[in-house]
Amino acid sequence: MPSSPPGYAFRGPGLDRSELLRERPDDLRARWTVARVLVVDTDGNARFPEAAGGCGFCIGAELAGELPDAASFLGLGEEGAWFALPHESLPEPLPGRMDLRSAATEWPALEAAALAEARALLHWQQRNKFCGGCGHALALGKGGWCARCAQCGLEHYPRTDPAIIVAVTDGERLLLGRQASWPKGRWSVLAGFVEPGESLEQAVAREVMEEAGIPVLECQYAASQPWPFPAALMIGFQAQGLPLEPSVSDELEQARWFSADELDSAVATGEVKLSPVLSISRWLIDEWRLQARARREAAPAG
């Protein structure tokens, strides 16, 4: 079981999504003028009036006198309603810009989580303008959370792509891999998307075998993280694997086992660069390092 609470991005307290309010457009319109609005451009960046700094959100009345058709309801915070609005729907561009990864480290947790929600929702809207059943244009409803086809009646909803991410240990060492496209020295735990008809546990075993040739004996759920780049949900596991020599496929450039001492030394010298602290991958690695350190300290002397 995890020994430290997850502290990575987008997992902290979020908005009350208040699903029932999505069905009450009059209530949403009444909340607009004092609502907090995250304006998001097509690259997924938050946009705001100040060219440098700024609070990251706008107030509804500053953008439009009434609720725009393009606005989507994100939920309720202590200070009221939050909405998302596509930047391209504004008559004039906003000069301030903040990408989601930067917001995750610089903004309060709730605002960063709201931006993650807004980015994922608007990305889905931008890429789903026509019905997958008949090709007819879609119209948004339910506060932006449903796209309806007037031609065939199909309703389309935002998709989330589940992906497993797993810290595999042989009892003494941690399995890490690196892709050829990553920066020099970057290593991480293994991850991959869940396939149709596959359980999470099956996905863990398949991905570890495909990427590193290591059979998984058992695994257990650890934690999860929304990862809206563009629409993944990272589902974290800790797993036990056989202590075999890794054999990589074309998905990885390298895979190897690290003892706790080897990993600590490689990180200290800069030989190994771990995932950024905003990600669940880093938490899984640090969690294993904490557990390894605890085992060393508990071991009898001599």
Image: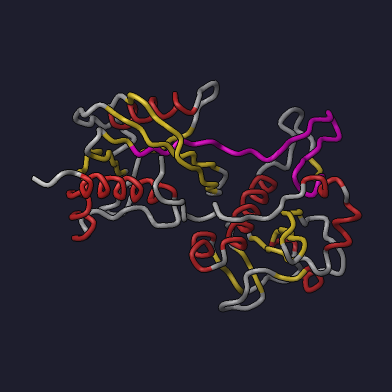
> Quarter-wise, where is residue 212 in the image?
top left
x and y percent of residue 295 in the render?
24, 44
Q: Which image quadrant for residue 204?
A: top left
Q: Which residues are magenta?
A: 141-167
- Give the answer, above or below, for where 155 lies relative to 23: above
Q: Is residue 159 magenta?
A: yes
- Is 297 situated left or right of 25 in this image? left
Q: Outermost residue, right direction?
A: 26
* Closer-to-camera residue (278/120): 278
Expressed as whole percent of the image width and height from the top left, the position of residue 132 reads 71, 31
Instruction: Tell me: residue 186, above or below residue 153.
Output: below
Quadrant location of the N terminus in the rendered image: top left
Residue nearest the observer in this picture, 126 or 286? 286
Residue at screen point 25% across, 26% down = 242
Which residue shows up at 36% across the image and 48% down it? Answer: 287
- Which of the two residues, 84 or 125, is positioned nearer the viewer here? 84
Quarter of the picture holding the C terminus:
top left
